[in-house]
Amino acid sequence: MLTALENALAATGLNLVGVTALRSYDALVPRKHALTPLLPGGESAIVIGNGGTAFWDAFRAFCARHPDAGRRPDPLDAFTQLVVEEALRPVLGGMPSRIVYPFRFPDDPVSFVQLAECAGLGRRSLLGLLVHPTFGPWIALRAAVLVPVAIEAERPADGFDPCPTCVERACMPACPAGAIADRGWDIPRCAAHRLRDEDECAARCHARFDCVIGREHRHTPDELAYHQYRARAALGEFVRGR
């Protein structure tokens, strides 16, 4: 089942798939973020993501074929839901399941970073981002599928810890706000810098861009700008909600 799902997802650039037991994740998060209440009898979470530019390329090609899709309020989220559910339908058949998405956090408050760590897809870095051994920080988590069967998968990030042994520490001097230090990412400082009228990080996060891992998988300029625009809006909401 997992192999069939990986093959179906890879066709649209969703090239990261990991698995964790629901109980393993639930033991590490507050109850409000737990997964077991979302699927009675659930055993495993199949975590779906992408590394590099393949998923963005698939999205841009889809928008070229369907111009109206690119004009939706959240076009990438809509594309994600479409391709994930199309890939799952023939693989899962009538198996009870539940799909959760990061962009539906208010309804399904799942900690996707914790979930991906449990699935062995990456480890958190000083940037606050999940880092994959091959793709570095150039990954994104798109969905998780809860199923009532125990599944095992490869765990590429087991034993991987990106920052302690990094000598170059290129992310720190690259950040114009000085928001990256040995203690980690200073979110309020980053937000204050980014929410100025002249946002020199509008085109890309300089700290992320200079990370020493996975530089060959960096996103294209248009994808960087898309995500930076969304991140700036999220930082504004964070500051207003404090």
Image (cartoon, rainbow, N blue to C red):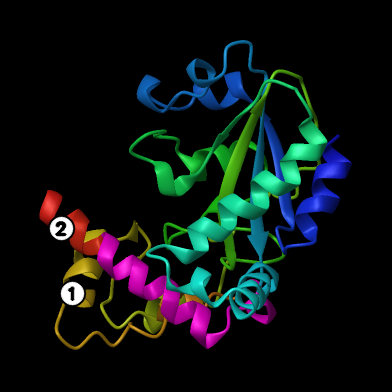
Residue under label 1, please give it: 195
Callout 2 amino acid: Val
Position of residue 161 relative to residue 3, above or below, is below
| Tag count | 2
* Residue 111 appears in the rendering: yes
Mark 2 / mark 1, whichever is N-terminal: 1
Q: Which mark is residue 239?
A: 2
Position of residue 238 relative to residue 209, above or below, is above
Residue for point 36% across, 24% down: 32
**Quadrant in the rendering for residue 184:** bottom left
Q: Is residue 77 left or right of residue 9?
A: left
* Residue 186 appears in the rendering: no
Closer to us: 124 or 7: 7
Closer to us: 178 or 141: 141
Element type at marker 1?
Answer: loop
Q: Measure the alpha-carbon separation of dots 2 and 1.
A: 10 Å
Residue 41: give x, y in percent of width and height: 63, 11
Residue 160: give x, y in percent of width and height: 67, 51
Q: Which residues are magenta?
A: 213-234
